[in-house]
Amino acid sequence: MKKFWILIKYEWLNFRADKGLLILVTLTLLAGLYGIYYGTTEVQRQQQNIAGLEKLTEHNVEELKAKYPEGTDAGDIGYYHSTFAVHHPDSWASLALGQRDVNPYYIKLRLLNLQSQLYDTENINPQKVLAGNFDLSFVLVYLFPLLIIGLCFNILSIEKEQGTLPLLLSQPISLPLIVGAKLTFRMLVVLGLGLLLSILAMIWGKVLPDGRVALWLGVVMLYCFFWFAVAFLVAALQKNSAFNAVTLLGVWLLLTIVIPALLNVYVSIKQPIPQALALTIQQREVVHGGWDKPKRETMDKFFALYPQWRDTTEIKERFVWRWYYAFHHLGDVAVQDLATQYKQTLLARHELVQKLNVLSVPVNVQGIFNAMAGSDLPSYVQFLQSATRYHDSLREFYYPFLFRQITFTPADFAREPRHSFSSAPDVDSAVNGFVKLLGSVVVVFGAGLLLFRWKTASVK
């Protein structure tokens, strides 16, 4: 054991003297700090925007109170009054933004047809999607492997190329001890950096301290172990440094770029998503067609869904609000199956990715982080479902005013439903991903150990 720590000491001295490695570690540290800053700032910006939505709603209410001080038909309020369905971030979202800056985190709603309002904000900046989020999870998943490659590509080959390996082996030191000490020192450096950045991010982002702390730190450690296992497997081949560097970079490219791209293509073919735009267009065609249909036909279809309003006064006027909102709702009903299929397909794609992510450890780890932070796709789908329920509650609130022809007074605004939805972590998915990650580490490290022993025995 004493020899082992002597080797660790000399590794530390060599590390201090190597400016290239110091620069590499420093750049990774700075990238991690920026990732923490970006994630925290983005979540704060979203929270500020969400706080501003409440003020917009209050301002809209005050305008309508001033416009209709004695009250008015509820149809006027439903048409001109807007409120918001809001998706509050989990406290962990600053560590892994996931899809929070890709999918909308709030939806402006009125009493009109729902589906077009849900997906009016679906269009996103393609450059943003291409660039991705530079948060802490991005640094850990994509940049830390490059740091490990830079530290480990020549752990054994450099001793051969410099001619120092025979001198080391002439001492009472074995080759496994030398490689083990080199890997251990580098693990201490990388794990220390990863855990430091994670703890700083948790403090900076004011995350809720719960069981996810241990899970996050465990995933960080296991993910680093995986890449050290890959480096050990390549080093066990006992090739030169250039071969090791190219091979490790090739593995990084394969696992972080090529396989995820192929998975995306496969999932897109296997589970094609119906365009929300097509759903919206079909709904609008139904709504616009409602103007040309006889009012009796429209209301009979509506009363079939809501028989409690069948005894309301027959419509004789050319335009009344309850008829207008009735055919808007029928537009939603006409595409209800498509809307359900859209959400189910999103979840089916996510489940398929969860099954296939064993082929790419980075994809698996990114999914673990997003699930822990409540910033994954299922969380967004739950938000859409919550917004749908909120719109239903708005209709139920306004329908008595519309069908009983009750005047909507300024005091009634206080009774209007409000919406709030907060992300919840998917701990089960995160734990399942952790088990897969552990299996990947065991398999790769075991293969490296067997190869190293075989190569070492053949040299002897």
Image (spheres, grey):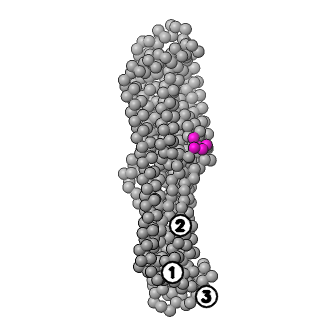
Looking at the image, residue 216 sits to the left or right of residue 83; the answer is: right
Between 278 and 29, which is closer to the camera in this rendering?
Answer: 29
Sequence-wise first label, 3 or 2:
3
Neighbor class of circle 3 (other Cα within 10 Å; few <14, some 14-19, many 20+) is few
Q: Mark 1 highlights which residue?
A: 408
| Residue 418 numbered mark, or none | 2
Sequence-wise first label, 2 or 1:
1
How far from the left and from the top, in percent, is residue 440? 57, 35
Q: Residue at x 57, y 24 (%)?
A: 449
Pointer 3 and pointer 2: residues touching (CB < 8 Å)? no
* Amino acid, disc 1: Phe
How far from the left and from the top, in percent, is residue 144? 46, 35
Magenta range: 209-213
Asked if 417 appears above or below 427 in the picture, the reply is below
Q: Which of marks 3 and 2 is in front?
A: 2
Q: Mark 3 highlights which residue?
A: 311
Neighbor class of circle 2 (other Cα within 10 Å; few <14, some 14-19, many 20+) is some
